[in-house]
Image (cartoon, helix red, strand yellow):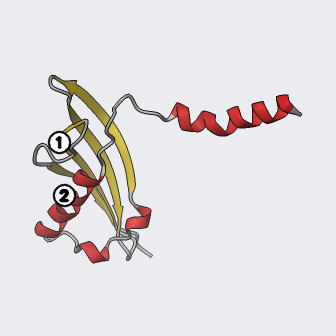
Amino acid sequence: MIKFNSVLIVLVLFPFFSNAKPVKNDCRSWPMNMAEVWLKNAKIIDIPDLDESKTEVKLLASEKKPHHLYTNVFRFVFHANDGRKFEVITQNVASDEECSISEVNTYLVSQSDINY
């Protein structure tokens, strides 16, 4: 029974450890919020029209710089309440303690609609 419990614990924790990132500070909220504001300011979509629970986030790259700084590149897929999707890439500088060291560069990669 002890072996079974040990194996069960390892199997439950394995996905968590396999997805661990080498970056100390996984700052996704700053670039995500700035990307939403960028979409709004570009008159692409209003923030209340996004379904934040469906937002997909992927850290594509994180380059360690001197002085505990990182250049992070994220991919976000924002889902609108009406079915539209917006794929955005962001790039910004963060530190071990602060996500908003730099401005966020935002790029709209694709926009798609669901046609019924």
Looking at the image, residue 7 lies above or below residue 101: above
- Amino acid of disc 2: Met
- Residue appearing at x 40%, y 69% in the figure: 114
The x, y position of residue 84, in whole percent, is: 35, 68
Please state which of residues 69 and 86 is positioned toward the viewer in this rendering.
Answer: 69
- Residue appearing at x 17%, y 42% in the figure: 92
Task: Specify whether 4 is left or right of 12.
Answer: right
Q: Look at the image and tell me in which quarter the N terminus lies.
A: top right
Residue 92 is tagged as 1
Looking at the image, residue 115 lies above or below residue 21: below
- Residue appearing at x 85%, y 31% in the figure: 2
The x, y position of residue 47, in whole percent, is: 25, 72
Q: Look at the image and tell me in which quarter the C terminus lies.
A: bottom left
The x, y position of residue 40, in whole percent, is: 17, 69
- For disc 2, the neighbor class at 10 Å (few under 14, some 14 to 19, many from 20) is some
Residue tagged 2? 34
- Residue appearing at x 83%, y 28% in the figure: 3
The disc, 1 or 2, on the residue closer to the chain's N-terminal end is: 2
Please state which of residues 116 and 35 is positioned toward the viewer in this rendering.
Answer: 35
- Amino acid of disc 1: Asn
Could you tell me which secondary element the residue under label 1 belongs to? strand
Q: Is residue 75 visible?
A: yes
The x, y position of residue 76, in whole percent, is: 32, 52
Task: Specify whether 13 is left or right of 91.
Answer: right
- For disc 1, the neighbor class at 10 Å (few under 14, some 14 to 19, many from 20) is many
Dot 1 and dot 2 residues touching (CB under 8 Å):
yes
